[in-house]
Amino acid sequence: MKKLLLLLLLVVAVFAMQSFGATEVPVAEEATAPVKSPLCGTIWSLAPALLAIVLALIFKEVYSALFAGVVLGACFITQFALTDTVDFVVNRGLIEGMQATTGVFIFLVILGSFVCMINKTGAAQAFGQWAQRNIKSRIGSQLATFILGILIFIDDYFNCLAVGSVMRPVTDAKRVSRAKLAFIIDATAAPICMIAPISSWAAAVSQYSTGTGYNGLELFIQAIPYNFYSLLTLCFVVMLVLMRFDYGPMRRYERNAIQNGDVHTVLPEQSVQEQELKFERHGKLCDLIVPVLLLIGIETFALVYVGGILEGKSFADALSATDATVGLPWGAIIALVLTVAFYRLRGILSFRAAMRCIPQGFIAMVPAILILTLATALKNVTSALEAREFIAFHMEHASAGLVNFLPAVIFVVAAILAFSTGTSWATFGILIPIIVSTFDPSSPLMFIGMSACLAGAVAGDHCSPISDTTIMSSAGAQCDHLSHVSTQLPYVLTISAVSFAAFLLAGFVHNWFIVFPLALGSLFITLLVLKKYSAKAQADKA
């Protein structure tokens, strides 16, 4: 703590010298462009994101870590001028960060209110009782969560929060830790959206795939069989559940849940908040199923409506042109209104009680909103520092002579970029144009390179502490965010290592039918070795 205070004092001293020791510059007759920081487009452009990640992992606290990264980036951009740095943090960082994610905030608040209403009616408790009668084991509860995550493939935000709110009572009853629940949610959010042609992710990829000679959605579909990370992640979840073991930090969380019934491990205070949301109502299973189906159906229509399906576009074209930040809140508002009317007609929730759920839902989502705001601010800062251009430049100039190795290289670069910036979609925007200009459109390497980009972006996003999908998974499972990151990281690294080897092989063997079974077998053997090692280590401790 003393060292941290000394560091802060040093920064303040630097600011003071910059502010009061600067000489006055004469004003020119014509306005001149602001001086560009010499750190832009250099290796230092990655420092703010890396600082945020390191601080978050060391101090187990994400708010100050993200803010520190934003401040450091602003210092680099403004060359440590005090007033300019504060102005940049407030305006370009926080305010623009909130503006860029306003639609997501609205969706989160509405979905939080939606979950609160379900809890108040007792519908979630009714589903939990039904699930306890029909789902007999911990394995069953985890597989049910996995299947539900597979079914909700429209959008990863919707997937994270909907699956979490529905399955949380079931996994709690079966003593599955919140960390494990968050991992299963995260593993069926972005990965399933990345191989589902009807999803907001497919729409985003299609927008960046111009100039290839292919329809954007067609190119996305052709790349699906080679998206090894997404496919292997889904297989990994099933293998891990059926093999009944965990490794890394997750093992401690799962052991504590099984032996002590503590599903939180490090976050018991959230159970108090959940108890406050439980009311003595007489909800039935239909009171959960009907609103969830309403939400899924209306959200699907909302996405294609925003994309222009009523203007004569096909379903695929409308989904390719949609804006999820508009479509999701659009559909959520309608679903919320219809759900309030449904519960009122059923006589299980008064209008006044339903309205009280709106601020309660907002309060429940405040941590996720705050993290998302700071994470978006950090993305704005790294963009201003031209971190993406720095990586893109080195990626493009390193391609000569490495054609067959490029899929594996692209996978690693995409993973690093997504991990550092916390966003898959920005990674698509950077790398897809480079891939399009690098590969021959008629070559199988076009599809493999595209898949490597998408797979690497998902892998980096999957384990990044500042990723919005990672944040949403923590919120959906009501799990401590850093606990989710630390427990998920070994799993992501395992799958990424096997995926990297698969892309190495695919660069020479342009046949997914050969490469994917070999990768799947390698993953299975890896898990068997890890299980044997884990059992041996546990026996040695005993």
Image: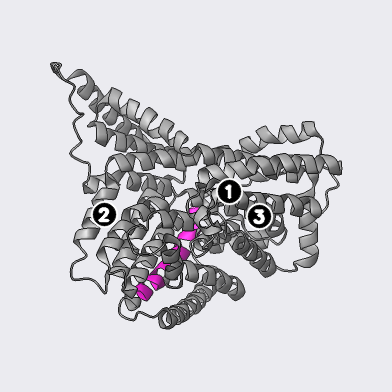
On the rendered image, what quadrant is the N terminus found in?
top left
Badge 1 or badge 2: first in the primary sequence:
1
- Residue bearing the label numbered 3: 262
On the rendered image, what quadrant is the C terminus found in?
bottom right
196 lies left or right of 126? left
Badge 2 or badge 3: first in the primary sequence:
3
Distance from disc 2 to disc 3, alpha carbons, whole Å, reads: 45 Å
- Residue bearing the label numbered 2: 392
70 lies left or right of 329? left
How far across and how far down the image is residue 220, in percent? Answer: 44, 64
Q: Residue at x 25, y 36 (%)?
A: 76
Dominant SS of magenta comes to helix
Q: Amino acid at mark 3?
A: Asp
> Is residue 483 found inside the magenta-colored segment of the image?
no
530 lies left or right of 149? left
The magenta-colored residue range is 485-503
